[in-house]
Image (spheres, rainbow, N blue to C red):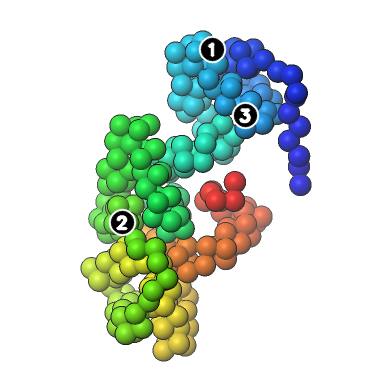
Amino acid sequence: MATLIAPEHFSPVEDAEALKKACKGWGTDEKAIINILGHRNAIQRKQIRQAYEELYQEDLVKRLESELSGDLEKAVYRWILDPVDRDAVLANVAIKKAETEFPVIIELSCIYSPEELLAVRRAYQSRYKRSLEEDVAAHTTGDLRKFLVGLVTTYRYDGPEINERLAKSEADILHEAIKDKIFNHEEVIRILTTRSKAQLKASFNRYRDEHGTSITKKLLKDESNVLQKALHAAIRCIDDPKKYYERYCAMQSKGLGLMRMNSLV
């Protein structure tokens, strides 16, 4: 495991000036940005950001947003932002490519607690002067839009109580919809976007007990269906976030995955 070695004595003003210089001209000096931000601890990075804003009346993060792209852009957000602000920015990056990077939105909505998701939504609105759900809706269409907007706007009950009779009836609803390939069924979207995690897990367990297989396996058969893939990702995030991220790590090691491992950063 690599260890960050940050200098004991540094000048946030000098670092801010060096970052400004790295962003000037036709090409961005990405190596200089990495050398600075990649070798400063969290407190130092916060001081650099404050110094940059005082010097140039400009948010360093927004400047870097306009200069960087891809994995380096996401890495920079992880380096210099507080967790809630980082998630808001990563959500915004994903929304711009929502048809392919929707797992980021699903992770935030289905792994985070209701209060954590609400905090991200507030940070998003403060930073972009628009709501998270507004931007999700603007960058998606059809059934995927309906599902993702439902996820980001929900405030699930977070208690442990479950209703076994309800778990059975909703497991049956999910089974019938999947069997008939009606993935955009209103009841499917209602169940997955409104029920508590405890209640959903009870329904997933009842599905497995009554039908001899997990609900996620039934959703894997058609990788070309975007809504089907989104439903699959949401169920995995709700049912077992640890396994979801273990699968992510395996995909990354094979060079197949593009999703960010948000809560492990």
What residue do we see at 66% from left, 55% from top?
A: 253
**Residue 48 % position (x, y):** 59, 21
Visible in this render: residue 245?
yes
In the image, taking residue 45 as reference, residue 180 lies left or right, namely: left
Mark 2 to mark 3 CA distance (whole Å) = 34 Å
Query: Quarter-wise, where is residue 44 in the image?
Result: top right
The alpha-carbon separation of the residues under discs 1 and 3 comes to 29 Å
Point out which mark residue 154 bears.
2
**Whether residue 79 is situated above or below residue 225 in the rendered picture:** above
Secondary structure of the residue carrying tag 3 is helix
Q: Nearer the viewer, residue 119 or 241?
A: 119
**Label 1 sits on what residue type?**
Gly
**Image location of residue 64, percent across then percent down:** 51, 25
Q: Residue at x 36, y 67 (%)?
A: 196
As drawn, 153 above or below 59: below
Give how far across and how far down residue 241 sits, in percent: 52, 62
| Image point (75%, 24%), residue name | 7
Q: Secondary structure at mark 2?
A: loop
Q: Residues within 10 Å of mark 1 (few under 14, many from 20)?
A: few
**Is 21 left, or right, of 195 in this rendering?**
right
- Name the image quarter holding residue 174: bottom left
Q: Mark 2 or mark 1, which has the lower sequence index? A: 1
Q: Secondary structure at mark 1?
A: loop
Q: Which mark is residue 4?
A: none
Point out which mark residue 25 bears: 1
Q: Which mark is residue 43?
A: 3
Q: Nearer the viewer, residue 161 or 164?
A: 161
